[in-house]
Amino acid sequence: MSLLSLAIWTPILFGVVLLALGRDEQAGAVRWLALVGAVVSFLVTLPLYGGFKLDTAAMQFVEKGVWIERFNVNYHLGVDGISLWFVLLTAFINVVVVIAGWEVITRRVNQYMGAFLILSGLMIGVFCALDGMLFYVFFEATLIPMYLIIGIWGGPNKIYAAFKFFLYTLLGSLLMLVALIFLYTKSGGSFDLATWHKLPLSGTAQSLLFFSFFAAFAVKVPMWPVHTWLPDVHVEAPTGGSAVLAAIMLKLGAYGFLRFSMPIAPDASREWAWLIIALSLIAVIYVGLVAMVQRDMKKLVAYSSVAHMGFVTLGFFIFSDIGVSGGIVQMIAHGFVSAAMFLSIGVLYDRVHSREIASYGGVVNTMPKFTAFALLFAMANCGLPGTAGFVGEWMVILGAVKFNFWIGFGAATALIFGAAYTLWMFKRVYLGPVANDHVRALKDINAREFLTLGLLAVAVLYMGIYPKPFTDVMNVSVAELLKHVALSKLN
Amino acid sequence: MIDKASWIAVYPEIVLLVMACVIAMTDLFVKNPRRTSTYVLTLLSLGVVALLNGLYAQGGQTIYAFGNMVVSDSMGNWLKCFATIAVMVTLVYGRPYAADRDMLRGGELFTLAMFSLLGMSVMISGNNFLVIYLGLELLTLSSYALVALRRDNANATEAAMKYFVLGAMASGFLLYGLSMMYGATGSLDVNAVFKAIASGQIKHQVLVFGLVFVVAGLAFKLGVVPFHMWIPDVYQGAPTAVTLLVAGAPKLAAFAIVIRLLVEGFLPLAFDWQQMLAVLAIASLLLGNLAAIAQTNLKRMLAYSTISQMGFVLLGLMAGVVNGNTLSAANAYSSAMFYMVTYVLTTLASFGVILLLAREGFESEEIADFAGLNQRSPLYAGVMAVCMFSLAGIPPMVGFYAKLSVLQALISSGQGVHIALAVFAVMMSLIGAFYYLRVVKVMYFDEPITATTVSAPMDVRAVLSVNGALVLLLGVVPGGLMSLCANAIVQMLKT
């Protein structure tokens, strides 16, 4: 069985075919082919969940083959409880994004769809790679399609955003590259992650490695204070780009902490946990306050993403079962919710061509169906029980309170800010009397938009009401990870 | 008495020489201004030469011929094979451009290109100071003439003049350094010089004095700071087809003589020349990358980019000997070779696109000329984008693995200085990413200024597509080429 290879290469193959053959004259056929590609790519990931064994922390669906003999780089794939859901999530969001771009994108449709399909395959590759170099190649390669997506289909200031996105994230990952080669040398010529996890390292080496990884992953997450690229990029990126960026790309960074920083440099991780916790708390509280004063809806959701990802890193670095699991659940939930939020903004933007909160008001009067969806997603964004947003945040706060009351207290107050900025935005955009003629002329969502938002709404509700399938998968793997991190690797 | 094996070792060069003369003669009788018949004949002969070199390289034997004057080894044969293919590709890309500018009349382009290739081959196979020097002169003299091929063009003549003056000086440096070495060791034979230096009998000061001049001469040929002045002017001034002839294949030959002289000849002095290379590398990375940002002319930008890329090659070369220990030598030099080969591959494709966009009476060499290329021709924009990402070192393009192997060579030496250099190099490549991305930006994000579609002859279209695909495919499966370079270098070090 090579399910993981299928999951990675199916979308990439479809993407390449689209790039090679697609013409704008046959945009309709291109869209359908893209949809078929995305759906097939999603379907091939389903057996992963079906065949996943819950009782082992070992890597499953492992594939291993020699890739670059000279450097002992292997094409080594596998998923465990930590990465499994992200494979499915990526493939799922890809379907949603392809549908969401259906009529909106009219220029160079094949390149748009191709870029998203290739991007989705590459990101799945990141989550499956068990070889350091393979991970890096996938991790970096995602920059290229995203750069093009932002730059070609983005807003007025797209060029600035595309460059900022590319160079900012490249800076972090180049330092990680040096760290990877250093580990390769230290381990006697191996890029194998499992080998690195067992490799004894001195305290200094661990700290250096920890900060090299931190440079790559903190930028990607993004953590305060290296989050400044995210609002700029989100504002300019097309709706689909924002959705994928927030839903999946940010998770690559958080996932990196779990796969690289913590198991490879456990002593340094424990030593520097206070730093990550402090930065995470700043992210949830301070960035939450920043979100409150935004006038631009996309910027607001971008800052809210930073705050939510703060919960994730906070959960990871309190080193408890419930914290780490909570962080992962929060990542998945945020994947659904942030994609939904950006797609909702996209629905409005396509009609009015404004992201300013002030341009709206009373949307509920003209778009009742859409407002119902928006309300659900807004509630999920502030973590209302019964929605996906609640589960992860609640687990993280629980873990944090056990770890230290005041940290838990700080994180919990952030929930209030979250509710404040989300609901305030909701009130100003959707409620009240109809604000202007643009809003009066609005037409409610069509079947296509209903489908995209509906898919996400089902996911958000399902995860909120019955999170067991999500937590069950990760339990054993998280326990194993924490057991590993608790042991010192100093030599 | 010259034995038969010696003749066999230089068959490719003999074919090259004979065919160059035949083509020069044939061309007298060709009236067609596009010179189709000579063009096909040239490609055929080069194809045979490449095949011969490839077969020799596959055989993997090391033959010393003509009383140790030349050597035919796996590294040299592969480099000759790649150089020949590079010249072929250059001619394919360059012919429509040259024909539009009336540069094919007289047929010098093909003949001179073959003679310059002959020069490269001699350089690569030379195992004796004089032979290496002769090859170098044959290459550079042909190149001077090529750059000046459009003698009514002011830019081209100026570039040729600069190239000639600086190049002659560099040759002088090299010759002076080599004569110092000859004086100190009493031999022109690379292997004998190695033995003489390794014996430790020779005064170190004299050797280092000669070494400085040799390194300076080589640095001129590679075009690294502070001996880089000619690069931007020649790249920009020369007709683009000739720029590619100067920028592509000769880099492989320059790499070969660096290996032949510094490694095979002066390895016992590695401690000294590694320090020199380190300084050159740092300066090149810094200046090349920073100056490239300011360029608006694409050819000039690629010139500065070359300077910085050569800095990376030098980083690979300087990591070979650590504390007198040559264990990591094979690793380091093969990383540099891999870097060079992939760099030439990428350069070919990117100049191929520049040549393609140039039309009669219109040079497409400003970065702005590429605006909206994606809308005019997604294929060529794609090729160019792949090249730019490769030069920037973004996976999965082949350029990434080149940088990776050099960084790996640096870091695995385990020295703090080398790790610091590696961090410096990646920071510089971050700066480099900016100007490569700018080209992508212009092609993909900007609106086109003209709506004219891009058309190309079948041969150019096919070769360019394959070339671009290789930059990407070698990135997806880089293992083969890496092993090839590693084996070649290991064999070279053994002898």
Image (cartoon, rainbow, N blue to C red):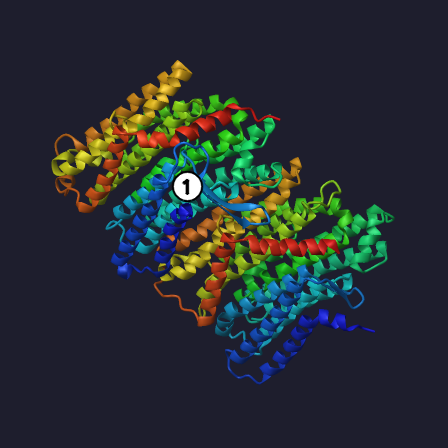
Rendering coords of residue B398 (x, y %): 52, 53
| Residue B205 higher or lower than A482, as above or below | below
| Residue B250 higher or lower than A60, as above or below | below
Rendering coords of residue A343 (x, y %): 26, 40
Q: Residue at x 49, y 66 (%)?
A: B463
Q: Residues within 10 Å of mark 1 (few under 14, many from 20)?
A: many
Nearer to us in this view, A72 or B250: A72
Q: Residue at x 14, y 43 (%)?
A: A443
Nearer to us in this view, A232 or B342: B342
Q: Mark 1 falls within which chain?
A: A
In the picture of the structure, the residue carrying the numbered disc 1 is A165
Instruction: Examine the image and state in which quarter residue A332 appears.
Output: top left
* Left or right, A87 with reference to B12: left
* Left or right, B483 with reference to A233: right
* Left or right, B220 with reference to B458: right
Rendering coords of residue B146 (x, y %): 60, 69
For the N terminus of chain B, the image quarter is bottom right
| Residue A403 higher or lower than A380, as above or below | above
| Residue A314 higher or lower than B222, as above or below | above
Rendering coords of residue B411 (x, y %): 62, 40
Whether residue A194 is visible to the viewer of this picture, yes or no, is yes
Q: Residue at x 57, y 64 (%)?
A: B86
Q: Amino acid at mark 1?
A: Phe
Whether residue B164 is visible to the viewer of this picture, yes or no, is no
Q: Secondary structure at mark 1?
A: helix
Instruction: Examine the image and state in which quarter residue B423 appears.
Output: top right
For the C terminus of chain B, the image quarter is bottom right
